[in-house]
Amino acid sequence: MRHAVAPAESVENNYFAVTNLLKICTHCERRSKKDLGVRIPRPLGNGPSRFIPEKEILEVSKVDARTQSIFEDAFAALGRLDNISLVMGFHPQYLGSFLRTQHYLLQMDGPLSLHYRHYIGIMAAARHQCSYLVNLHVNDFLQVGGDPKWLNGLDEAPQKLQQLGELNKILAHRPWLLTKEHIESLLKAEEHSWSLAELIHAVVLLTHYHSLASFTFGCGITTEIHCDGGHTFRPPSLSQYCVCDIANGNGHSIHHNDSLGNQELCGEVEVLMERMKQLQECDDEEASQEEMATRFEREKTESMLVATAEDEECVPSRDISRHFEDPSYGYKDFSRRGEHMPTFRVQDYSWEDHGFSLVNRLYPDVGQMLDEKFQMAYNLTYNTMATHKDVDTSMLRRAIWNYIHCMFGIRYDDYDYGEINQLLDRSFKIYIKTMVCSPEKTTKRMYESFWRQFQHSEKVHVNLLLMEARMQAELLYALRAITRYMT
């Protein structure tokens, strides 16, 4: 029987109940200790995102009935409304597809047991040091009866799950290295063997959580106050406003795009729109296949030279690193060693013609759900760019999607990769590569440095594109390796 749906205001009340009530100033905290003998926590951050003003996110659910309805359904099914969903609420059509897919992967009938599903989610999120997702699934893992001993480290989990560690590592960082031999080692491991159906389920979960870690870092998602890392018992800094004042709207926030900033940025959107117009007008001048291939190889090489986030080393904490092996393994090593990345030609193996049917055959309905989600992110448009309306953004969306696939060595023969340098500037490329390849290094400064005149909702849309393009790229390599094993 389905849970009763909470009234419209309950979703918002749920959010405010665990945030606004606990925004306690030093004075209030002292009084609570004196009167009640308890320590009252306060949130470490304001709102669901470190990058996007809380007010903008919460406004979405108030004005959009569809978003409100999706929030209610999610709250009724899970008993919670996480910050990822709140930020995705800028795009309710996509959010509905995302939540349906995730619910099916985690809770509906499938090849893997419920506790295996959540443990695989932990393994995948841990590869990118995403404590937000790790903690979420640690709690879910325990709720569905998972063995707490497994949480001590991957070496405490069953051998069958330990064997998934190599696949997890390669898919997360260098999926082009995946071979049919990796697949064979999992399917022919005697008493610890995976079935094909189980492996497809595991692969979809791994790619889902690798890419969701990218979205989590790319949008600056904060931990909910009731979760580990989401609160503190320390009083606010004396040099800052009282948290109660901020909660009541008496504080102030610093925005980078003030009137002076807007003057400096004036024309950014217009320049991009003009480039799109020029490229559309040049469509008749078709380059040769040799030239198209050369442009792809050039872009692929250049993408490897794009630095990620100031070359900072992110050392995973013990709480995270115990869930995976070989923490030094990452995308960055590839470009530094100058290894050759082979080109994956989409006409030889595509999602539409090959991957979709394989997934649907071995894990019914999931192929259809994934296809809908990919299409939703790729085709989503409101025909706007910043303050401009009636704009065809398809060329820009395709450039973003194809650039990500290019970074993974995937080539579309019918696409002119010369367009990418026309439409994506260097700061945007740095953000894309960091978020897709080393998301744990994404910073607020990087988020603010690209598309500075655009709305936050448009940047969230970019993050949805990046997330889905990354997931499809990983899936293509994994499914191609499985197909090669099967044939």
Image: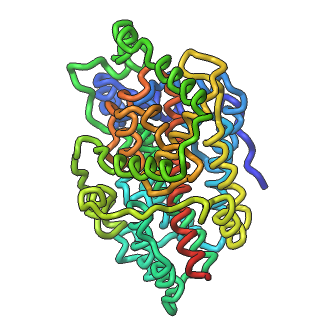
Looking at this view, is 270 or 158 the one in front?
270
Q: Is residue 1 above or below residue 215?
A: below
Q: Picture coordinates of residue 435 (x, y %)?
A: 40, 45
Is 450 situated left or right of 402 in this image?
A: left
Q: Position of residue 338 (x, y in %)?
A: 27, 60
Is 412 located above or below residue 458 in the figure?
below
The answer to whether one can see residue 27 in this image is yes
Q: Is residue 42 visible?
A: no
Q: Nearer the viewer, residue 351 or 71?
A: 351
Left or right, 428 with respect to 368, comes to left
Location of the N terminus by quadrant is bottom right
Q: Quadrant of residue 266?
A: top left
Q: Name the quadrant containing residue 446.
A: top left
Residue 305 horizontal/vertical position (percent): 29, 47
Residue 354 image-quadrant placement: bottom right
Q: Residue at x 33, y 17 (%)?
A: 254
Image quadrant holding the C terminus, namely bottom right
Residue 137, compared with residue 67, is above or below; it is: below
Residue shown at 37% from the left, 11% from the top = 258
